[in-house]
Image (cartoon, rainbow, N blue to C red):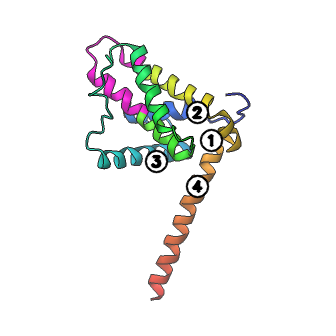
C-alpha cells in the first residue's frame, strides 16, 4: 500500500463489509464504513434488479469452485471485467468489494465442507485488498486514499440534506 498514512485501510473497510454482509456482525459505526455498506448493498440490489441471476456466472462456470486457486481465478476474472475499460471510481471500487463478498457467499453456500468458511472469507478479503491496493495504488494516492472517498460521499450527503431542507422550507412557505 505504500505511503497510506490514513488509519482507515482498504483491508479494514473490506473486512468490515464482509463481517457485516456475511456474518451479520457490526464491529464499528465508523462513518466511512457505514457509507461503504450502504453503497455496496445498493449496488448489489441494483445489479439483482438488472440481472435476475445475480449469481454472476458462478453457477454456469466451468471452473470447479472447490479449490482456492480456482476461486481466485474467478475473482481475478471479475476484477478484470469490472475495470476492463480502465475507469476507476469509488463507486466501482465499492461495487467490486460487494461482488467479492457475493462471490465468497456463493462459494460458502456451494461448499461440500472441503474448505473452511473462515479460509474462504479471509482469502477473498486478501485478494480483494491486494487487487485494490496494488492495481489502483496511484489512483488511491491521488484521491487521498479512503479519506477522499469519505469526503466525496459526505459532500454528496450534505448536498442532499441541504436540498431536502430547502424543499421543506419552500413547502412550508407555499
Return the residue at label 4.
154
Q: Give the image location of residue 108, x and y in percent.
A: 32, 23
Identified at 46% across, 35% down, the residue is 81
What residue does disc 2 label?
A: 10
Which of marks 4 and 2 precedes in the sequence? 2
* CB atoms of marks 2 and 1 within 8 Å: yes
In this picture, which residue range is highlighted in magenta? 100-120
The circle on residue 146 is 1
Task: Give x and y (percent) for residue 107.
Answer: 33, 23
Percent coordinates x, y for residue 150 in the rendering: 60, 48
* Quadrant location of the C terminus in the rendered image: bottom left
Q: Distance of mark 3 from mark 2, alpha carbons?
A: 15 Å
Vertical placement of residue 109 versus 5, above or below? above
Mark pair 2, 4: CA separation:
18 Å
Q: In the drawing, does residue 23 fall left or right of residue 110?
A: right
Residue drawn at the location 45% of the way across and 84% of the way down: 172
Residue 30 appears in the figure: no
In the picture of the structure, the residue carrying the numbered disc 3 is 39
Asked if residue 105 is among those painted magenta in the image, a careful observer would answer yes
Amino acid at each position: 500500500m505504500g505511503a497510506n498514512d490514513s488509519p482507515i485501510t482498504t483491508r479494514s473497510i473490506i473486512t468490515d463489509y464482509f463481517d457485516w454482509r456475511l456474518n451479520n456482525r457490526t464491529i464499528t459505526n465508523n462513518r466511512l464504513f457505514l457509507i461503504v455498506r450502504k453503497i455496496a448493498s445498493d449496488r448489489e440490489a441494483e445489479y439483482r434488479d438488472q440481472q435476475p441471476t445475480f449469481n454472476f456466472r458462478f453457477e454456469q462456470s466451468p471452473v470447479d469452485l472447490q479449490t482456492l486457486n480456482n476461486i481466485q481465478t474467478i475473482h481475478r476474472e471479475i476484477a478484470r471485467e469490472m475495470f476492463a475499460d480502465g475507469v476507476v471510481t469509488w463507486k466501482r471500487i465499492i461495487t467490486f468489494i460487494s461482488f467479492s463478498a457475493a462471490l465468497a457467499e456463493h462459494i460458502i453456500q456451494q461448499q461440500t465442507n472441503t474448505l473452511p468458511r473462515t479460509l474462504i472469507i479471509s482469502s477473498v478479503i486478501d485478494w480483494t485488498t491486494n487487487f485494490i491496493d496494488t492495481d489502483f495504488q496511484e489512483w488511491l494516492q491521488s484521491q487521498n486514499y479512503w479519506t477522499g472517498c469519505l469526503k466525496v460521499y459526505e459532500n454528496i450527503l450534505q448536498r442532499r440534506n441541504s436540498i431536502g431542507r430547502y424543499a421543506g422550507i419552500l413547502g412550508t412557505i407555499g
